[in-house]
Image (tube, grey):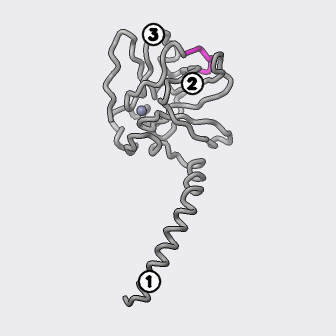
Amino acid sequence: MNRRDALKTTFLGSAVVAAGVWLGKPLAHAAGLFHDDSKALGRLAKPASFWRGKVSDKAWAVLFEENTERPGSSPLNDNKAAGTYVCAACYQPIFKSADKFNSGTGWPSFFDVLPASIGTKEDRSLFMLRTEYHCSRCGGHQGHVFEDGPAPTGLRYCNNGLALKFIDAGSALPTLRG
Ligand SMILES: [Zn+2]
């Protein structure tokens, strides 16, 4: 390769990189609307496969494929005990029992979430615009949040019971994993 070709290659390379930088952001954003990218959203940045076997297959499908459990199927629906609800994958605390309420939807529901425990993204699946939320640590999908909850927040965090693990107030919180 002579100097001129080398320059040309460098120039082309830069142009490709520049285009990638320019296109990268909106493309990634658009992809986020149609593609399940929850795996990459957590601070741990572990691939979904990392959590295989650490949770049940059903829980894994909810957490890392954004599956939704059948309404009324979670034993946590009627749980009124005092304690903390942690992410079933990485054990990060997400809800406290004092913020749980009976929404009548068939899914464990909360009107508030522990600080910095979740991230959110737009979910345009099923021809609806909903706000998906996931564990901020491992990225595991938890549920959707709606603005028809009770006071004081007016929010309803509609959660999959399979994505949570309940820790009774009398027990120590589990060590975070991942
Ligand atoms: Zn987690």
**Label annotation for residue 7:** 1
| Depicted 167 relative to depicted 163: above or below | above
Q: Would residue 106 appear left or right of 64 to someone viewing this image?
A: right
Closer to the chain start, of discs 3 and 2, is 2
Q: Secondary structure at mark 1?
A: helix
Residue shown at 56% from the left, 21% from the top: 112
User: Could you say where residue 52 lies in the image, as x and y percent from the top left?
Assistant: 35, 39
Please give the range of residues in magenta: 100-106
Q: Which residue is mark 3?
A: 82
Q: Amino acid at mark 2?
A: Pro
Q: How many marks?
A: 3
Q: Position of residue 132 (x, y in %)?
A: 57, 36
Q: Is residue 84 left or right of residue 22?
A: left
* Quarter of the image that includes the N terminus: bottom left
What separation in Å lies between label 3 and label 2 (alpha carbons)? 23 Å
Closer to us: mark 2 or mark 1?
Answer: 1
Q: Residues within 10 Å of mark 1 (few under 14, many from 20)?
A: few
**Secondary element type, mark 3:** loop
Q: Residues within 10 Å of mark 3 (few under 14, many from 20)?
A: some
> What amino acid does circle 1 point to?
Leu
Q: Determine the residue positioned at 44% across, 40% down.
A: 42
Magenta-span inclusion, residue 79: no
Q: Quadrant of the C terminus?
A: top left
